[in-house]
Image (cartoon, coloured by chain):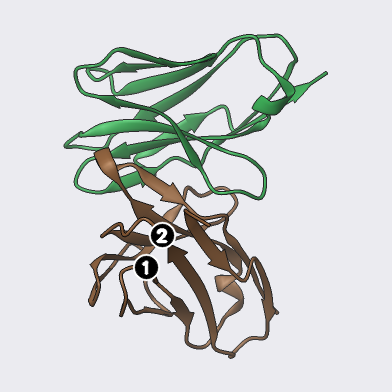
């Protein structure tokens, strides 16, 4: 299917576990982004990538790691999950006119 | 303090009524302003984009306005429908993108 997909859609994990959230886009967009969305806050940028093998920190990068070996994939890893990382995570890619296209989100609960 | 403030936080209206959502920002320099609609359990979807020189832009029943001098934008929804129930997010781009916390709109029959 064309577009941007995320997996899993829902995840429950325990404190201290490593978790990887997947993001895949079929448009070959250069830029990709990871955001977290918490109640009362706007979307906050965790990491972004300008191209394969080029990544950079956003506003709230602590506790997260990203990689981008292929243009279409941009996984986000929580190295040692904490309760404060309970959130909804959105992946996005940037197309023409700088418009961002968002995935459906992953709801992560850390117990 | 967030550089993009939206009001109200939530709003309930009856189907068929109009409503206006507000966005005030302090982002500088300014490149463009977008309004996104986010249905429950989904990612945001762009409704409109406005640049510095644009005052008004429409997308069906949605009309966005921008006053770059006062750094204010509004999103007006005409003849609301049940499917308009969603969160509406104002996003201002400058050196980077700044997101408002959103207005949660509920349209009741």
Please tell me whether mark 1 sits on a helix, a strand or a loop: loop
Identify the residue at image location x=26%, y=32%: B32
Mark 1 chain: A
Q: Residue at x 71, y 9 (%)?
A: B16
- Place of residue B102 in the rendered image (x, y in percent of width and height, measured from the top left): 53, 37
Between A29 and B16, the one nearer to me in the picture: A29
Q: Earlier in the sequence, mark 2 or mark 1?
A: 2
Reply above or below: A107 against A63: above
* Neighbour tally class for label 1: few under 14, some 14-19, many 20 plus, Cα within 10 Å: many
Q: Residues within 10 Å of mark 2 (few under 14, many from 20)?
A: some
Q: Colour of chain A?
A: brown
Q: Quadrant of residue B58?
A: top left
Residue occupying image coordinates x 51% and y 43%:
B44
Which residue lies under the disc numbered 2?
A26
Front residue of B72 and B55: B55
Query: Residue A95's spot in the image, x, y percent?
Result: 31, 47
Which residue: 67% across, 44% down?
B40
Residue B72, given in percent of the width and then of the height, sits at 35, 21
| Alpha carbon separation for disc pair 2 and 1 | 6 Å
A83 sits to left or right of A46: right
Q: Secondary structure at mark 2?
A: loop
- Residue indicated by mark 1: A72
Judged left or right of residue B101, residue A73 is left
The colour one sees for chain B in the rendered image is green
The foreground one among A85 and A3 is A3
């Amino acid at each position: 299917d064309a577009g941007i997909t995320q997996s899993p859609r829902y995840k429950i994990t325990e404190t201290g576990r490593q978790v990887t959230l997947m993001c895949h886009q079929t448009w070959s967009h250069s830029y990709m982004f990871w955001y977290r969305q918490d109640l009362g806050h706007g979307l906050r940028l965790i990491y972004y990538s300008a191209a394969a093998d080029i990544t950079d920190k956003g506003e709230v990068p602590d506790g997260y790691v990203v990689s981008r070996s292929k243009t279409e994939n941009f996984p986000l890893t929580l190295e040692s999950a904490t309760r404060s990382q309970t959130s909804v995570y959105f992946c996005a890619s940037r197309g023409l006119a700088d418009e961002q296209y968002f995935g459906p989100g992953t709801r992560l609960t850390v117990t | 303090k967030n550089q993009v403030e939206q009001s109200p936080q939530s709003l309930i209206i009856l189907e068929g009524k109009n409503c206006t959502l507000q966005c005030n920002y302090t982002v500088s320099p300014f490149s463009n302003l977008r309004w996104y609609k986010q249905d429950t359990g989904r990612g945001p979807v762009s409704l409109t984009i406005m640049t510095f020189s644009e005052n008004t832009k429409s997308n069906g029943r949605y009309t966005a306005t921008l006053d770059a001098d006062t750094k204010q934008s509004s999103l007006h929804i005409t003849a609301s429908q049940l499917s308009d129930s969603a969160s509406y997010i104002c996003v201002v781009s400058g050196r980077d993108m700044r997101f408002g916390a959103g207005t949660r709109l509920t349209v009741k029959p």
